[in-house]
Amino acid sequence: MFSDAQWFFLNETDSTNNVIQQKLAQGHLPEGSVVVADYQSQGKGQRGSMWQSKPGENLLFSMALYPDFLKPDNIFWLSKAMALAAADFASNHCNGVQIKWPNDIFIDGKKTGGILLENTFRGSGIYASVAGIGINLNQDHFDELQSTATSLKMVSGKQLNVRECAAELSACIAHRYAQLRKGDFEILDRDYHSKLYRKNIQSKFQSGNHIFNGTIKGVNEQGLLMIDNGSEILNFEIKEVSFLNP
């Protein structure tokens, strides 16, 4: 898989996702093609948030995929597969890796990585997806806005080579993407839920102005977070609910 993939290493760009999108607009890009940058001036996070990273210290990675075998209403399976690939990669270097819904990578309750999927549709189907993955590798100081962040080096004590990590992450994606293509949904769902952050643990949440206690029971096929508030199961979309500190 990805035998024809092209690799692009950049010193700086606005966003590695943008670079992939531009290359897709110029013509067909082989599946599995990757852009890696030392620095992003406008790194993207979920729902318009920013992904901040010190130059040359972390993995800033985007890959082109063509998941046309998925129906548009099953697109969250791709998010699960990419989250698992990133978690697999991080687990190669550290213990205690978890996936915080929908697809952030956490270690010991601190954010270590994030994923942004940008999908392009043609007609009634999915044409292309750009999987942007940022993982903190070697950064050991974060500003106040990132006070809950950590890196693989901070956890393991080991300095990592960014390009070697990019190749390793690509292999992890190829493995999970192959499972997705084969329709191994039970495996993906089992593995995703086995790593789901604070699953079956009483937690405090906020939705709008409402603060409540509840327990995460899982994530459904549409990607909604299922929380048991003691009287019913509530389903939430991304950004509709957030964790509050214990």
Image (tube, rainbow, N blue to C red):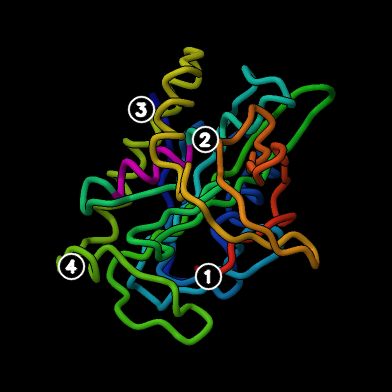
Alpha-carbon span between mark 3 and mark 4: 25 Å
Q: Position of residue 15 (x, y in %)?
A: 58, 63
Q: Amino acid at mark 4?
A: Gln
Q: Which residue is mark 1?
A: 245
3 or 2: tag closer to the N-terminus: 2
Check disc 3 and report its element: helix, strand or loop.
helix
In the displayed image of the protein, which residue is found farthest to the left?
Answer: 158
1 or 2: tag closer to the N-terminus: 2
Q: Position of residue 230 (x, y in %)?
A: 65, 43
3 or 4: tag closer to the N-terminus: 4
Q: Which residue is mark 3?
A: 175
Q: Amino acid at mark 2?
A: Lys
Q: Residues within 10 Å of mark 2 (few under 14, many from 20)?
A: many
Identify which residue is drawn at 36% across, 66% down. 58
Q: Residues within 10 Å of mark 4 (few under 14, many from 20)?
A: few
Q: Which residue is mark 2?
A: 80
Q: Of 227 and 242, which appears nearest the observer?
A: 227
User: Is residue 231 shown left or right of residue 50?
Assistant: right
Q: Amino acid at mark 1?
A: Asn
- Disc 4 or disc 1, which is closer to the eye? 1
Q: Residues within 10 Å of mark 1 (few under 14, many from 20)?
A: few
Q: Main secondary structure of the magenta part?
A: helix
User: Is residue 192 shown left or right of residue 232?
Assistant: left
In the displayed image of the protein, which residue is found farthest to the bottom?
Answer: 144
Q: How many marks?
A: 4
Quick one: quadrant of the N terminus? Answer: top left
Q: Which residues are drawn in magenta?
A: 82-90
